[in-house]
Image (spheres, helix red, strand yellow):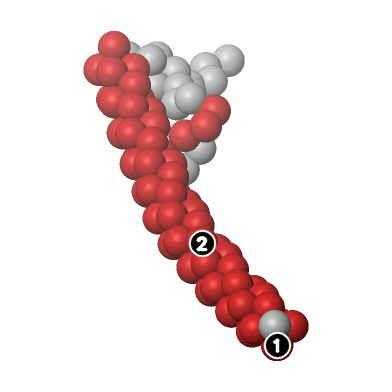
């Protein structure tokens, strides 16, 4: 009878190992999917922020305020303003 209990114990341990491995694989798959989803949403938000900054800069340019926002350092406009930049002494 001791041999039968040992076999049952080995099978139970093997089943538990398989169960835990499957559970870990499922968790890893879900974690990967969630990570990809989060990264995708962050990228989308970054694109929206870039579009918003561009819209703000466009509006400022239309209003005659040629100074770009500090975060838009690469998106400066070189439109001449009347009466600015002239040194008449």
Quadrant in which residue 3 is drawn: bottom right
Pointer 2 and pointer 1: residues touching (CB < 8 Å)? no
Q: Position of residue 48 (x, y in %)?
A: 33, 34
Q: Residues within 10 Å of mark 1 (few under 14, many from 20)?
A: few
Q: Is residue 56 above or below residue 20?
A: above
Q: Position of residue 81 (x, y in %)?
A: 35, 20
The one nearer the camera, 73 or 7, is 7
Q: Is residue 70 rendered to the left or right of residue 32? A: right
- Which residue is the site of mark 2? 23
Residue 61 visible to an observer of this rendering: no
At a point 34% along the width and 21% down the height, the residue shown is: 56
Quadrant in which residue 41 is drawn: top left
Q: Position of residue 24 (x, y in %)?
A: 55, 63
Q: Is residue 71 rendered to the left or right of residue 82? A: right
The one nearer the camera, 25 or 81, is 25
- For numbered disc 2, what is the local secondary structure? helix
Residue 26 visible to an observer of this rendering: yes
Quadrant in which residue 9 is drawn: bottom right
**Residue 64: mark in rendering:** none
- Is the N terminus in the top left, top right, bottom left or bottom right quadrant? bottom right
Q: Is residue 36 above or below residue 24?
A: above
Q: Looking at the image, is mark 2 or mark 1 earlier in the sequence?
A: 1
Q: Residue furthest front?
A: 1
At a point 52% along the width and 17% down the height, the residue shown is: 88
**Residue 3: mark in rendering:** 1
Q: Residues within 10 Å of mark 2 (few under 14, many from 20)?
A: few
At a point 38% along the width and 48% down the height, the residue shown is: 37
The one nearer the camera, 26 or 8, is 8
Q: Is residue 72 above or below residue 61?
A: below
Number of marks in the image?
Answer: 2
Q: Position of residue 54 (x, y in %)?
A: 33, 31
- For numbered disc 1, what is the local secondary structure? helix
């Amino acid at each position: 009878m001791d041999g039968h209990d040992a076999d049952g114990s080995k099978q139970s341990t093997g089943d538990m190992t398989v169960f835990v491995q499957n559970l870990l694989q499922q968790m890893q798959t879900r974690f990967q999917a969630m990570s990809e989803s989060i990264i995708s949403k962050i990228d989308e938000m970054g694109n929206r922020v870039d579009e918003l900054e561009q819209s703000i800069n466009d509006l400022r340019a239309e209003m005659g305020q040629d100074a770009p926002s500090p975060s838009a350092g690469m998106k400066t406009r070189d439109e001449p303003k009347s009466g600015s930049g002239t040194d008449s002494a």
